[in-house]
Structures are given as C-alpha cells and as structure tokens.
Image (cartoon, rainbow, N blue to C red):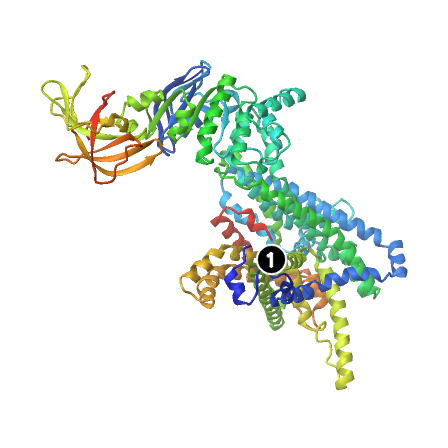
Amino acid sequence: MKTNSWFSQRLGQSPDGKASRWLSPWFIGIALCCLLLAAPVILVFASLVLPQTAIWQHLYDTVLSDYIFNSLALAFGVGLCVILIGTPLAWCMARYEFVGRKPLQVLILLPMAMPAYIIAYTYTGLLDFAGPIQSFLRQQFAWQYQDYYFPGIRSLPGAILMLSLVLYPYVYMLARTAFSEMPSSLEEVSKSLGASSQRFLFKVVLPLARPAILMGTALAMMEAFADYGTVQYFGISTFTTGIFRTWFGLGNGIAAAQLAAMLTSFVVLLLFLEHFSRRKVRYYFQGQKSAPMTRVKLTGWQAWSMASLCFLPVLLGFIIPALQLVSWAVDSFHRQFNGAFFTLIWNSFALAAVASISAVTLALLFSYAKRLNQFKMIHGLVNMVSLGYAIPGTVVAIGALITLSWLDFRVNEFTEYWFASSVGLIFSGTLFALILVYCTRFLAVALHNIDTGMARIKPSMDEAALSLGHSPMSILKNVHIPLLKTSVLSALLLVFVDVLKELPATLVLRPFNFNTLAVRTFELASDERLIDAALPALAIVLVGIIPVILLTKMTESKPVELAKMEK
Amino acid sequence: MLMLNDLSVTYQNKVAVQGVSLALAKGQIGCLLGPSGCGKTSVLRAIAGFEQAAAGSIFLRDHKVADENINLSTTERKVAVVFQDYALFPHFTVAQNIAFGLHQSSKAQQHRRVSELLELVGLPGLQNAYPHGLSGGQQQRIALARAIASKPDLLLLDEPFSSLDRELREELAKELRVILKHENTTALMVTHDQHEAFAMADVIGVMQHGQLLQWATAYTLYHQPAARFVADFIGDGVFMAATVNEDGLLASQLGTFAMDKGHQFAPDQPLTFLVRPDDIVHDDDSHTRAQVIDWAFRGSHILYDLMLQNAQQDRVLCLALSHHHHQVGELIGIRLDLQHLIVFAAD
C-alpha cells in the first residue's frame, strides 16, 4: 500500500530513513501489541525445550496414538465430507435456476450459525436409545433393546458427520464464488473447440475451482482440529480433549502445552495449504472481464428434485436441530428462564462486546499502521498475528494461562517484596486473559473487514481532500470515518458472535463463578441435561444467524469478490 | 462456406438482429462493422451456436445448421471462436491451451502442431508459460493459435483487438490476415474500428440497429456507400444540400453535376450529396474561396475545416498537402474534384 507521505511527514517520519524506522512509534507500538497477542502461541512452542520424559512415556504408552489417529481421522473425514457436500451444492446453485433458488441462497448458509457442539447435542437427543427416532422404531416394530442395529451417533463417524453438517458452508461459499465468477466465454470456447460438457467440467471447471475448494476445505479442517465441544461430549480422545486431560487430570501444564504445539503443527500445514490456494485463486481469476455463465433454467420435476436436493443440507444442518432446540426450550422454559438466565445473557453479551471492541480497536490500529508505513516489518508482524484465527482455542488458552500466571507470579512477588501485600491474579484470574485470547483468535476477522474498508479509501482521496484545504483531522472526520463505518460495524458484529460461540478457551480461562451461554450449554449437556441446555443453546444460535444474514446481504449486493475472502 | 439468409436474433422479445443476409466464400475474410449495440456480435454468436436464430437460416459448408427449428450445438458446428477477452484457460500452460481442441490427436501430433502454431504466431518457445504471465498482444496470439489449431474452416473473431493499444491493433490485424491467408481459413470478424476492418477484411458489412446496411469491399463502402449511415460511419466527409434542376443535373452551391440516368429523385426534392475531404482540392488559383475555420495536422496532410463564402455558410472538409499551411480566418482557393457522386434524399 502506498504511504501517505503527508501523513507520515506530519508524524515526523521520514519515509526513507532506514534506522529511524525501527525506532518509529508505529513500529514499537505494533511490535509490542503483536508480542502480547502472539505470546501465548510462542510460549506453547517454547514449552518444547523442557522435555517431560516421564509423562510423555506415559502418554506414548497409553493415549497418544489415539489422539493422533482420532484428530487426523476427524479432520480428514470432515475435509472429505465438506468437499462432497459443498462442491456439488455450489455447482447446482451457481449453474441452475430452479424453484426456490433465491431463498435457498440464504438458507444454505444457516448451518454456520449452529456451533458444532450444539448440533451434536441435538442429534444425540434425537438419535439416542431414548430419543424419539429409536423409540418410534421400537414402538412401530415392537422391537426390544438389542433387537436391532442402530448406528451410534456418539462415535468418530458421528462426530465427522456433525462437524461436516455445520462446516460445509466454507467450501460451498468459496466454490460457488469460483463457479459463478467463471466467465461464460470459457464455456463457449470449450464448446467451439469440440469439448463435451464432461470434458469441460473435469478439465476446466473443477481444476479452476480446485484452489477455492481446497481453501474452504482447509478452513473446515482447521475447525475440525480445533473442535473441543463435540469430541468431548462424544467421548472421543483427540488432541483438544487430551490437552485438557493432561492439564487438569495429570496436572502437567508443560506437557499440555507440548501437546498443543503438536496440534498446532498440524494446523500450520493446513495454513500453508490455505495460503497457497488463496494465491492461486487470485491469479486464476484476475482480469476476467466477460460476463459470468448464465444459469440453466430447470422446470417441472427436475427443478423440484434439484430444490429438494439442495435443501437437504439445510434441513439436516440447521432446521432439524433448530426445531429440536425450540421444542426442548419450550419444555424447559419454566425451569431455565429466570434471573440466572439473564445473568448468563448479560455476562455473555458484555464479554463479547468488550472483546469485539478490543479486537476492532486493535484492527483499526494495525490497519492504519499498515496504511501509513511502508516498513515491511510492520506488514509482516500484522500478517503474522492475523494467523491467530487458525490456532485452536484450546492451544491459545493454554498458552495464555501459562504466560499470564507467570506474569501474575512475578507481579505478586514484586508487590509482596515492596508493599508486603499481594494483588492477586490480576491477569490470569480476570477477564483480561479471556479478552487477550479472543483478540488473538479473532483479530483476523476484524482486520479483514477493516482492511477491506480501508482499501476503499484510496490514498488519492486523502491527497484530493488535502489539496482542497482540509486538515488531517477534518479528513479523518469527513472521509475516513464515514467510509469505514460499515466495515467497523460488521467487524464488531462478526467478532461479537464468534466470541459468543467460543467454547474451549472460555471454559479454561473464565474467572470463578463467571458463566457464559456457551459454557452453561456445555455444562448442562455434559450433565446429560440436554433439555435444560436448549435455552442457552438456542440463544447462541439465534444471535449467530445475524452475521449469516449480513453475509448474504454482502454477497447479494456484489457478486462475492474473492478479494473479500482475503483475511 | 458461410451463408446467412434473412437471419434474425431476438433476446427476450427484443430484436437484436433483423434480416441479415451475407455469404463468405472459402478463404475469404469478412468483417461486421458497426457501433456498439448494432447487433454485430449477436450475428457472430448465432453463427457459433451460442444464440438461437429467431428467423432465417444459417448455412455452414452448404449444410443448414440453424433456422427457427433447427439448432445444431456449437460442438457440432465446428467453428472456432476468438473472444474479446481471449478466454484462455488460466490453469493451463500455453501449450495445453493450444492443444485443448486437439484431444483426438496423439501426444506427438499435438506437440508438433503446438510448436508449428507458436512459430506461426511469432511466439516460439512459449509452450510452458502461463497466460497470466503474457502481455495482452501475446495472449491474443495464443487465443488465435488455439482457435486455428484443429484447422477449422471457419473462424469467428469477436472484437479480437479491442483490449490492445491502438498502435498494436492495426499491426496485429495485418499479421492476422497473413496467418489466416496462409492457413486458407474463412473468417468473420466483428469490430467497431474501421481501420481494423480495412486492415483485415476482404469484404465488410456495416450494421446499424440490427440491420446489415451494406456488404461490400472497403473501397466500395468508402466511395459508393449505399446508405447515409454508411457514408457517415466510414471515413470523414460532409453532406451538401442540392436539388435536381430542369436539365436533370444535380445543382448545388459547388456547381452542377451529371446524375445517373436511373435516379428516382423528383425535381425540387431536397437532396444531399457526399463530399469527402479528398474531393475538395486546395488550389491557390481557384476563384472559389473558403475561409479556414479549423485545421488538424495529419503529418503528410492537413485536414482543413472550411466555410464556403455563400449565404448558407456551408462547411466542407479539405485534405491538403501539409506544405500548404494556412491560419484560421484566412481565405483559401478550393476546387471540387468529385469522382463519385453519392446522393441521398435529405431528411
């Protein structure tokens, strides 16, 4: 990005000065922020220098192979399923015009509002032995226990299915963009060169969409690696549950951090895949000017069967679980809807609000730092911390807990020495820890939105306003703030909802007696009080719908620019 | 090779092409010329099979491929198309792009043909480059090479030079003509730029409002335009008022002229006739004087905008050698040297 020389001059920087760049207030400020945000992850990797031989021998003998196998099987299973659901779905929606396509465009994204652990609870309730489906079958056919085979939902395949049902929109969105941005001339030229529709599909369409599909798959697989709620509830030993068990069961923080480092290494591989794909997407679709392909109109039974087929993922991924939640919530309303529930709502919303304001403030700072400085190090640092979205919440939480308790310990030592009193756990025992972790995790979401808004403010606009006699403050007020407003609002909203849904980090770092909707849902479900868990779960889902609608609004106003997906 | 009979194309009840008829012989290069929205691209798309003909028929190689009922698919028609945006496959190398239509040949044959074509379009050795690394002109040539790889007997080109720099256009158009003549390919190009059309085509059709106004050589279009729009669209020139006098001669401010015997104009009907800049000769000895209103330097020539010294203050254009340089306001001598008399009824 081009430096606004006038702005830098005002800030007393010489844009070309080499040594002064390292000492510029921008660089020092950004570096400190980045260090704070990255400290938990750095510490997780630093833990590798303290070998915990005894406990690793134990892990190796017992559960380590389970962790590795289950985590990998879960991630790859989810990866495969989301490709199989998302890609054909995207092709149908991009390629055909049929009854109900417009409303389906919105509906298809709704499963994103459903956190994986919540869909897992509802299907468990639906499909368990005492659930309505099995009861119905027993009643209908006069079966007894063990008379029949019924696939257990609390299993690895079950977890893969649950996660895939809510994660397929990643692949769907990216693939659909790729399909619908494909210029119609490519199809016409293929036909004129004598290629059949199959040849066109397999030689042109799918290879061209492959980077986008892989990018979506990588994002879904990251979520699968990071999942804690579902696998914990289904009793599957993965890295995330293993980290919890090693820390709280075996009481070894260092070993837990080492497990976290292992998990992160897998995720980093996915990050490479994602970034590589993102680069490809960008050059595949540059400079295509011709009109996109027109949709083929289907009529009659073809249209209806296409519509039902496309409706299936929504039905399974959102409508059935949502209806189940509503029915449970109605049953448990009198028990759950009380003062405690309002405290829960207040805690969750206040926490999410503070976290989203912090993350967006940081994002604004980072985005301006990038805009006003050509210094490569600043861009590098900002890009590095915005990778936090890929790091599982459990990992960041463990890292933050270790870092901040160490800091608390030092602070208390200091105050006890000089003031003969301790200040308590001011970092690790308060909401500060949670806010820090949320910022690390969700900075990318905020930064992506702010950067998009910032890109709309061309440097030439600053120069034009300046030449028309406006002061920098007036430019900020009259040009930047109005243009950034919507980006800031959508960034706030997206981070707010992400924080509200976040489970594992909140579980680890929440202060004593501080409960949120997500944590309460998890606790109630873990106690097998699924019906009572429905009300807080439903609250999370309802709030989660807002950004989905926002997303469809954005995609409708402009045919999703791929640039928008750049975090 | 290609014949259109009364072809019409409609989009959602909007007529885009109306009653277009034309024919191209084997190896001939045709061009449809017209302003944007005149329907020229729709004609091309109907020939390629991307649009259905609403009325009329299309014949390729003496076979009917389309009328109101028949609509052979693009694949069956075997016509090659070069698109305005080139439509190169971004995930394929240059060689893979060119070989895309050669999937029925062996690998070795494909390889040979690709090298041959790259040689022909003047980009040898570019096999393994990717399209995004090429310049606009290079991409255009690769798109051409891909289109003619399987030796199609008909090639359609949709504004093939529009994304290129002006200087590059005419040069590439001439090169393209050489290549097409070398391969003996019949081609139909669509453009809005008459210089491209002149550089490329054997025969040019001027279109307006979905209708083909004239289908002729460049020379005929310029000197014997069949419609007022054609005269306006091709080249510079002005229309001067005139009438047919009692002697059957065309009378105007610039003199009287003999008319064709077969003309249909009534006496005293208001008429206009076309005066091209090269019809007005600058002659210092001439008694007819005109005032210089404006001039534009064109290198070897100067294009003068002149006002006649008559009551109507008629304007004419004059192309004079650039040695004769006169300033605005000066009176200069002119003489009319009309080779072709083009008369239309005045509107």
**Residue A32 placement: quadrant:** bottom right
Give the percent coordinates (x, y) of residue A496: 59, 63
- For residue A87, above or below residue A17: above
Give the percent coordinates (x, y) of residue A319: 59, 51
Q: For the point 80% across and 51% down, which residue is it?
A: A68
> Which residue reaches farthest bottom?
A420
> Which residue reaches farthest left?
B246
**Helix, strand, or loop for circle 1?**
helix
**Depth check: B217 or A208 in front?**
B217
Residue A105 seen: yes
Is residue B235 rendered to the left or right of residue B85? left
Q: Residues within 10 Å of mark 1 (few under 14, many from 20)?
A: many
Give the percent coordinates (x, y) of residue B220: 32, 20
Quadrant of the image containing the N terminus of chain A: bottom right
The chain containing the residue under callout 1 comes to A
Is residue A401 rendered to the left or right of residue B282? right
- For residue A428, above or below residue A120: below
Residue hosting label 1: A445
- For residue A542, above or below residue A342: above
Disc 1 residue type?
Val
**Depth check: A515 or A290 in front?**
A290
